[in-house]
Image (tube, rainbow, N blue to C red):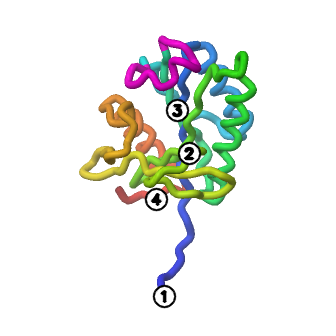
Amino acid sequence: MGKIYPLKKVKLIAGLISNDEALLDKIGYRLEKRLKNKIDFKSDVIDFAYTDYYDKEMGGGLKRKFLSFKRLVRLETIAKVKLETNDIEKRFCIDGKRAVNIDPGYLDMAKLVLLSTKDYSHRVHIGNGIFAEVTLHYKNKRFNFWPWTYPDYKSGEYARIFGIIRDIYRGAKGAKKKA
């Protein structure tokens, strides 16, 4: 019989996509309030040109920004985060179309996990209709992708951002210290 160990808390992240840069900042503020968790990292705004998946709904000229949050969270509560971000997306809809896409997830020393409402072969249900996907894994001192990893998450620019967030996580109280 295997021994059950206490779970380490994880670093909450959110990737935002919109063609309105001011809205990205507004959403960050809204996330802080809704999640009761202060932002401790904001990436620069990045052009989102990896796919046209969102163009029909959100328009062209999309931008991406990543955030991470200071207070580490328990894995048992992580599915609730996706429910909260879905609600925020709905509140900012214009004529039934999203003005912002919020991709929440978490990072620990070994991986980056994204949360989704969509099931697929590489996703696992974690509760309340929310699925988790290990999008990147950390090996050989860098983040590495899987065959199912979204094209933008395969970029060196994203890996650099998640490396910075991982370093912040490593220094946080309650985080696992070994790489």
Secondary structure character of the magenta stretch overall? loop
Residue wearing tag 2? 118
Q: Is residue 14 left or right of residue 87?
A: left
**Which of the two discs, 2 and 4, labels the residue nearer the N terminus?**
2
Q: Is residue 106 left or right of residue 140?
A: right
Q: For the point 64% across and 23% down, which residue is it?
A: 98
Q: Which residues are magenta?
A: 48-61
Residue 104 picture quarter: top right
Mark 4, secondary structure of its residue: loop
**Which of the two discs, 2 and 3, labels the residue nearer the N terminus?**
3
**Which of the two discs, 4 and 1, labels the residue nearer the N terminus?**
1
What is the distance, in whole Å, between disc 2 and disc 1 at their CAs?
33 Å
**Type of residue at label 1?**
Met
**Which of the two discs, 4 and 3, labels the residue nearer the N terminus?**
3
**Which of the two discs, 3 and 1, labels the residue nearer the N terminus?**
1
Q: Nearer the viewer, mark 4 or mark 1?
A: 1
Using the image, determine if residue 20 lies above or below residue 163. above
Q: Position of residue 61 (x, y in %)?
A: 48, 11
Q: Nearer the viewer, mark 2 or mark 4?
A: 2
Residue wearing tag 4? 176
Looking at the rendered structure, which numbered label has been put on residue 1?
Answer: 1
Q: For the point 72% across and 29% down, which residue is it?
A: 90
Q: For the point 48% across and 23% down, which residue is it?
A: 64
Q: Position of residue 9 (x, y in %)?
A: 56, 56
Label 3 Cα crowd, 10 Å radius (few <14 / some 14-19 / many 20+): some
Label 4 Cα crowd, 10 Å radius (few <14 / some 14-19 / many 20+): some
Mark 1, secondary structure of its residue: loop
**Which of 106 and 53 lies nearest the eye of the viewer?**
53
